[in-house]
Amino acid sequence: MTQVSRIVILTGAGISAESGIDTFRDSGGLWEKHSIEDVATPEGFARDPDLVLGFYDARRAALADVEPNAAHTALARLERDFSGDLLLVTQNVDDLHERGGSTTICHMHGELKSALCTSCGTRSPWETTMIDRPPCPVCQAPTLRPDVVWFGEIPYQMRRIEEAMMGCDLFVSIGTSGAVYPAAGFVQQAKRLGARTLELNLEPSEGTSIFHEARHGPASELVPAWVEEVLGA
Ligand code: OAD
């Protein structure tokens, strides 16, 4: 592998699949069991807040039963040992990158372990449930919602991501189907800006032909092998 100095990595649900977290669009995935309109839109929340709060409470509680896998820990090793710049952007709302040892993570779709107060706008670390309408730790209003980005809302930290994309010489997409924008458009953007692009996914994603290179297989095997290559180059 040629030497690279600035890497942007985008991860999706596939990186956490081998840890036991359901992806969204694979067979048996979350969007087969739940409707996006009901649990992942502001309109769904307005219609039936208990359904939505219960859905995310269950997903938050399920984090206690899973552990990071070799792909998460390999990316943490890359962050530690890579001498260039690295930005890890994830669409995942789980905390497995953090628990795998990564420290700088851009959660563009928010986090399960965070609460957003719809009264005062504060984001607070959150470990427990919301269906029982606990007070916001800052303003005390019982108006918390999951701090996750729903369809129709603007993803977090887009400016920071765009700045990193401008200067990157390698863009790597890991475990994402490439079905949801703006993340699905990052590969085209990176390519236009002159970066090399690499896909690491179980199977070809929707945008697989756009990448300069695509490797297919489980993240727990592909990611550690790729990290080894980068650090050994
Ligand atoms: P998807 O469920 O759409 O795609 C998961 C991808 O991971 C698929 O392409 C699988 O082939 C791949 N995959 C599955 N197991 C894998 C493994 N062991 N190793 C490597 N790859 C594997 O999930 P995302 O692309 O993350 O947004 O979905 C993007 C967004 O859509 C999510 O952040 C969420 C969802 O709706 C919101 O809720 C706003």
Image (cartoon, rainbow, N blue to C red):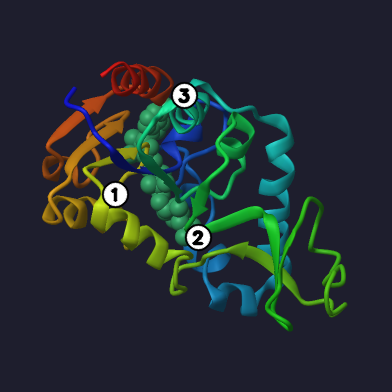
In the image, is the residue at mark 3 within 8 Å of ligand 1 by its beta carbon?
no
Q: In this rendering, would 7 be left or right of 120?
A: left
Closest to the camera, between mark 2 and mark 3, is 3
Q: Mark 1 points at which residue?
A: 178
Q: Is mark 3 on a helix, strand or loop?
A: helix
Percent across and percent down for residue 129 are 80, 56
Q: What element carries label 2?
A: loop
* Cα gap from disc 2 to disc 3, whole angstroms: 33 Å
Could you tell me the amino acid type at mark 1? Gly
* Cα gap from disc 1 to disc 3, whole angstroms: 22 Å
Q: Can residue 185 be seen in this view?
A: yes
Q: Earlier in the sequence, mark 2 or mark 3?
A: 2
Q: In this view, does 217 lie above or below 194?
A: above
Percent across and percent down for residue 217 are 31, 22
Percent across and percent down for residue 11 are 41, 42
* Cα gap from disc 2 to disc 1, whole angstroms: 19 Å
Q: Name the residue under label 3.
A: 74
Closest to the camera, between mark 1 and mark 3, is 3
Closest to the camera, between mark 2 and mark 1, is 1
Q: In this rendering, would 55 be left or right of 126?
A: left
Tell me the quarter of the picture where residue 46 sits: bottom right
> Which mark is drawn over residue 105?
none
Graded by Cα atoms within 10 Å as few (under 14), some (14 to 19) or many (20 or more), the crowding at tag 3 reads many
In the image, is the residue at mark 1 within 8 Å of ligand 1 by its beta carbon?
yes
Q: Can residue 180 be seen in this view?
A: no
Which of these two is toward me, 34 or 46? 46
Could you tell me the amino acid type at mark 3? Ala
Q: Quadrant of the N terminus?
A: top left
In the image, what residue occupies the spot 45% across and 51% down?
91
Q: In this rendering, would 209 be left or right of 34?
A: left
Q: Which of marks 1 and 3 is nearer the N terminus?
A: 3
Q: Name the residue under label 2.
A: 35
